Image (spheres, coloured by chain):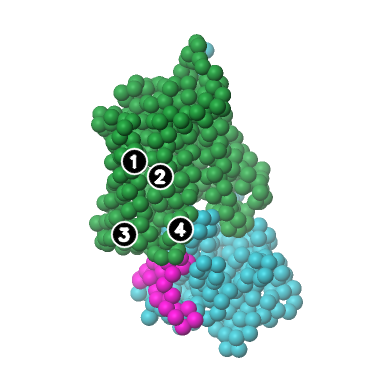
Chain colours: A green, B cyan
Amino acid sequence: MPGTVIGLGMVSFFTDASSELVAAFLPVYLLYGLGVSYVQFGLLDGLYTGATAVLRLAGGHLADRLARPKAIALAGYGLSAFTKLGFPLAGASVAGIGGLLALDRAGKGIRTAPRDAMITAASDRGSLGRSFGAHRALDTAGALAGPLIAFALLAWVGNAYDAVFGASFCLGLVGVLILVFFVRDAPAPVVRPKVRIRESVKLLSTPALRRITLCVVVLGLATAGDAFLFVALAKQGGVPGNGLSLLPLGTAVIFLLCAVPAGRLADRLGRWRVFVAGQLLLVTAYGCVWLLTGWALVPVVLALHGLYYAATDGVLMAHVGGLLPEHLRSSGMAVVQAGQALARMAAAITFGALAQGWALGPAFGVFAAALLAATLFSTRASRSVTP
Amino acid sequence: MNRKTAGILAITAVLVLGGGYVAWSAWRQSPASAAGGLDVTKRGSLLYVGADGRVAQRAQNGTTTTGDLRCLRVYSAGGTTSCMRTVAVPAGFETVVLGKSLEPLRTIRVDGTPSRTRVSASGRLVAWTVFRTGDSYQPGRFSTTAGIYDTQSKRLYGSLEDFALTIDGQPYDKPDVNYWGVTFAADDRTFYATVGSGDRTWLLRGDLATRSLTSVRENAECPSLSPDGTRVAYKKKDQDGQWRLTVLDLKAGTETPLAETMNIDDQQVWLDNATIGYGRPQNAGVYAVPADGSGAPTLVQARASSPSPL
């Protein structure tokens, strides 16, 4: 495994732990630390996703333009880390806290594409899937550790809430320091093509990337939010009213354990093939919560869901990274990621409206059918491009 | 000094300084003298959560005692105390039901951030409400779960969503319903709660024995039944979208807005049959206001929340 990949994995581990620590702790902080209503913050959630998509494109383009993905990734990681120091200063100001959350997500948007480009640059063509799998496994481990640290700290320091933000900042800073000291930028080619916005835009006229982006958007439009799947699973699987919050852990653990094997499999069988097969796992999971009941559903659906992430999340970027010319890698990855993020946002709104007007089960039936159609479309659309 | 050594030194420095800061914060929190002695059987006193996150008790003569119990929300009645708090592994929240000497009797994991909790006057029934973001059908909204535990039969009603709901005489089965803010009647069977669906809310009367919920009137959230069972205090949305504390006379069906004009997001308590207690925003403190709409709010306990009269 290349050192850069492990290094970036550790950076993501600490950064995700830092961010998820705050995310888990924020409702408690707002409601009980500050005594302000949580209602107002939920409304901003949708805005972030949109803003992140635009910043992803900007981050990707800048990384290519300057040919310095590490510098751009560092700016993103640094921004998120230093945001954590702002929370104690913002006090009970709703605008202040909303702004800090937006900055945190902005950092995430900026860094993602350059970082994935660095993973690609550091890996052999033949083992991209394994590299991305290792990175995503460490990333997920960080996301699991964050809430645990948050609530363990609360038990220890009581309501010394500044200490919780301080701990989050330190974790983020450790991530930044690992990036600075232990991760090397790939040497920039001596002669490199100049990258302007036009080249980044033109990327979409390359058939391979255009088709992948189209497929990813179509698939994204048929992907329901995870939270809904867990609610439906709790209902259909007869999970008692107090077990819902444990279900996401099941998905995360399976993802964590299977990310590397799935990546290796993708390297051997073809990344796009594994990515598409992963969609079928999700179709099956949707079908299960739509049609079946019983406790056995719980382990089955969680396994399908975790395997879906293992087969698609890192594998998609491994596939895209392998196809793009080196000097436009960050931009290209950003285009695919932004397309996916926006499509999923639209899907979340559609799914919500469908479930509200109808019911959760049938809504998953519709999405299962739509996702199956999108998957078949993706198999055909890409046949001419990828082996 | 090479790059790797510099990196290791820098990371070690951050971890040591950060760990030291957290340890210092924890140490600073411990009280100089561990004041124990909460007595939930002492009538006429007020239990609340203090500014340091610990449950405290204010005696009738105004003296306060802080205990070692940490809760986000607390409520106590009839010798039973409900404390909602965080759990580290797996990260989340729980309601712990405590007995007369605050010994834990049962721990119930809950699916979201604690919002409300109540205990019936006899101490038999315990209710809680939690909220979550992410699985609401409308983006940016949150969903809630309200549950009840019967300490006598040990029966757990994990979610009111499993009850049959009737609104304005018609069975109501829209999938987007959310329940919150349970309050109990003296018979340990009847309760009141709120249901929300779309942009509307209703005050409900519930029956634990038949597992049914029936609407009483629209636009009433987080009810609180008076000790004599004749009135319900709740927060009502006015035209500006602000919550106004309001009392409903159940027999006459008349609503009385209270003298508190601030936007209050709390489940009220009855300090006695004529006085309402509640927490003001930003942990300003527990306030009291007459239940008949007269008078003005008065401060009961500064920098306190989650009042529970004993």
> Looking at the picture, how far across and down is residue A232, in whole percent?
36, 59
Q: Which disc number belongs to residue B193?
A: none
Residue drawn where x is 54% and y is 18% of the image: A194
Residue identifier under label 3: A290
Asked if badges 1 and 4 are on one and the same chain, I answer: yes
Q: Is residue B55 visible?
A: yes
Q: Nearer the viewer, mark 1 or mark 3?
A: 1
Which residue appears at 66% of the width and 46% of the height?
A96
Q: Report whether A195 appears left or right of A233.
A: right
The residue to which callout 4 is attached is A352
Where does residue B179 sit, x and y in percent of width and height? Answer: 48, 68
Q: Is residue A173 left or right of residue A139?
A: right
Q: Amino acid at mark 2?
A: Val
**Gap between marks 3 and 4 measured at Cα:** 15 Å
Residue B164 falls within the magenta-colored stretch: yes
Residue at the top extreme, as displayed:
A190
Mark 1 = which residue? A378
Among the two numbered marks 3 and 2 on one chain, the one whose residue lies closer to the N terminus: 2
Q: Distance from label 1 to label 3 (Cα)?
A: 23 Å
